[in-house]
Amino acid sequence: MQERLEAFQHYVEHHVLHHWGTPDAGTHADWLSSLGHQGLAIFHFDAVMLFVVALLLVAVAVAARRKIGRVPSGFGLLMEKYVVFIRDEMVEPNFGGKGQGRGFIPFFCTLFLFILLANLLGLIPLFSCATGNINVTGALALVFFAAALGATARKGGVRALGAAFMPKGLPGPLGPIMFVMEVISFCTRTIALMIRLFANMMGGHIMLYIMAAMTAIVGSLWASPTVLVATVLYFFELFVAFLQAYVFTMLASVFIGMMVHPQH
């Protein structure tokens, strides 16, 4: 039993370290090597998984473009509904109303699909969950950071950036204080986006790892309850994969809209 507990601890620690982005990513793929598929262990590196997600995004874009100029059906109809959803539920409500923010639709469509595909691939045993790595979510947060500042500057230059961080109508002495507070608030939003996605994806996958390890520890006689819990957690993680992609994209659209159109 002690050996099993030590193996359990070692197993979970490897996955926790991997989610924190250490160079230890490949060591927990020994089971692939034991099956004679050592080459498949490359899919446990998040850099490889990001490349796989990028390829899938390209494939989705190519498949969607094949339906341009035709009556949409099947996958083309699904993608049309998806784009309309992003436009009507995220972009226009946060960018000033009907017809506003059309240039941001491709950005948010890509952002949502990127996060969703990374989340879903992480639920396939062969692959790792790239969004469970804080370095990846940090990079996504930096993309939001750059998009927010770039969009605001493009709209009105330095004056628009000043308006985004300096509310109108303030008494003179409060101006510098509010400017500092708004800058801190903007940085806090960026960090919150990074931590929220990372923590939710990491937490769910760690629970799945624990259930899988417990199944091996308790043996086949008592494995049924842990297998049942793991199955329920797995389907819950499917829901979380969609939810976290939606939350990240929705919050990004709200925050960018607040800067581009501070009057709204």
Image: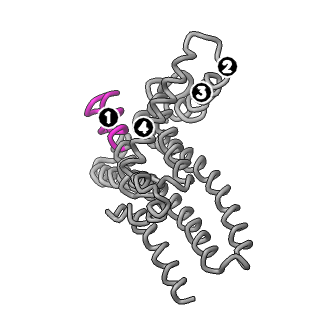
**How far is the residue under mark 1 from the one under mark 3?**
27 Å
Mark 4 belongs to which amino acid?
Ala
Mark 3 belongs to which amino acid?
Met
Q: x%, y% of residue 32?
A: 47, 60
Task: Give me the residue at 48% from left, 73% from top.
Answer: 11
Question: Which mark sits nearer the N-terminus, 4 or 2?
Answer: 4
Front position in the image: 37 or 126: 37
Which of the two marks, 1 or 3, is nearer to us in this view? 3
Task: Give me the residue at 34% from left, 46% from top.
Answer: 142
Residue at the disc numbered 2: 73
Residue 13: numbered disc = none
Mark 3, Cα crowd under 10 Å, few <14 / some 14-19 / many 20+, is many
Residue at the disc numbered 1: 150
Residue 54: numbered disc = 4
Q: x%, y% of residue 94?
A: 52, 35
Residue 79: numbered disc = 3
Considering only vertical position in the picture, is 103 above or below 180? above
Magenta region, mostly helix, strand or loop?
Answer: helix
Considering only vertical position in the picture, is 12 above or below 192? below
**How far is the residue under mark 4 from the one under mark 1?**
23 Å
Q: Are marks 2 and 1 in contact (CB under 8 Å)?
A: no
Question: Which mark sits nearer the N-terminus, 1 or 3?
Answer: 3
Mark 4, Cα crowd under 10 Å, few <14 / some 14-19 / many 20+, is some
Q: x%, y% of residue 132?
A: 46, 57
Mark 1 belongs to which amino acid?
Gly
Task: Give me the residue at 53% from left, 42% from top.
Answer: 250
Disc 4 element: helix
Give the residues drawn in magenta, as a range: 145-162
**How far is the residue under mark 4 from the one under mark 3?**
17 Å
